[in-house]
Amino acid sequence: MNRTLTAFVFIVMIFMLLASCSTSSSTSAPYPPEVAAIAGNGQVIISLAPEPGSATVNSYTIYYSTTNPVTMSSGTSVTGITGASTTITGLTNDTMYYFIATAANAYGESPPSSEARAMPGINIGTVTILASESWLSTPQGIVVDSNNVYWTDNSGTPFGNGTGDVRKVGINGGAVTTLVSGPSAWQYGPQGIASDATSVYWLDNDSGTVNKVLISGGTISTLVSGLNFPQSIAVDSTSVYWTDVIGIRKVGINGGTATTLASGLTILPGYTQGMAVDSTSVYYFSNDAVMKVGINGGTVTTLASGLNFPTSIAIDSTNVYWTNNGSLYKVGINGGTVTTLATWDGILGIAVDSTTVYWTDDDSGIYKIGINGGTITTVASGLYYPASIAIDSTNVYWTELDGTIKKVSK
């Protein structure tokens, strides 16, 4: 009898606790809202949504500024917003704006949200979704040719418990084709991909291999195995090049014996996501420096040093471009003075053509600047953590964390 009474009292206490929690959540100020910013011509559209589990929201207040970080005391305020979005007009094009927001009800105002940012501009393009994966699929490296966009994709969970894919879609969209699927494509960490006229090449970080498959699909060819942390990859007409803990290495596009071009390097997993090749040299990072070595080995040349976690790298006929601490730099392919092209916060991937450098911003959009500097302009806005990037003569292509492959006109 006592046990029954004790159980009954315990159940009553649980219901009282739940009722108390329910009451407190409806009689308290809301959580900070979720905020997104999409740039337009002289304006930014701000999307607002209650944080899941938040108390009822009656209105929002937006605070914005050209100074980062924006605060409730330093920002210009827009009050009394009751809808899911609002447009802030009268903004200066090619200027970055930073936004936070609060949510309020009868019981008070929330703390400020996380910061969103956007740069208005007159030439922001319309984004096209070429492929959309599930949230459990995370597109990584990307490369494009005249017909297709190719990418590597993680699915499931890391450290060998998921699968990996090599996929393609037409540059104008259409059906997604899986070229390779399953553990043979799985990798965890920086995921490189490259292509030539016939094949797609990629690194499997988990199994330590360099692989290729025809651009039409078919049998996987493993060119090299037994590697330790293979990461960045590039290809020319005869060889595939990559970084691993030994150094800069290459193998013939049909396999064979791997050759070490440069060794004794500090190749940091997660921070050496760049490699580029021209007709004479391989360009890469070694810890805090931009380096080059001949495609057949030889003298290693330091082009720039004193860096802090350099990541993406690209080249044209005269210069090497890279990101360091989220900003953009260049130096001549034979060294010389380092030029800062853009002081930024959060550049991930970069690509270059004959006139312009394009990059993905880890928070908001695609941006560009001339190869000799100048005004930064917005190419696409309101994106969800864009990462890897590729370009052709007319478009910019990129991956996003939400499992999409997208493009926009340059």
Image (cartoon, grey):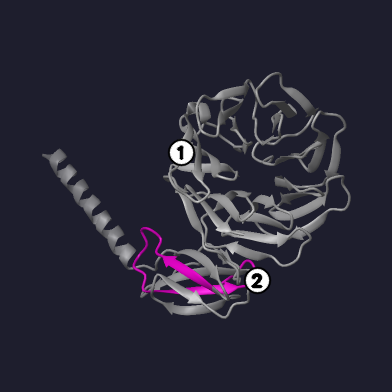
Q: Nearer the viewer, residue 40 or 342?
A: 40
Q: 167 left or right of 230?
A: left
Q: Quadrant of residue 226?
A: top right
Q: 144 left or right of 34?
A: right
Which stretch appears magenta? 44-72
- Work out whether residue 108 can be spotted: no
Q: How many marks?
A: 2
Identify whether 108 is placed above or below 359: below
Helix, strand or loop for disc 2: loop
Residue with the mark numbered 1: 177
Task: Report if residue 49 lies within the magenta region.
Answer: yes
Q: Name the outermost residue toward the top.
A: 257
Q: Which quadrant holds the C terminus?
A: bottom right
Where is residue 9 shown, x and y percent of the image?
18, 48
Residue with the mark numbered 2: 95
Identify whether 110 is placed above or below 219: below
Label 1 to label 2: alpha-carbon separation: 40 Å
Q: Amino acid at mark 2?
A: Thr
Identify which residue is drawn at 65% across, 30% down: 230
Where is residue 60 shown, x and y percent of the image?
43, 73
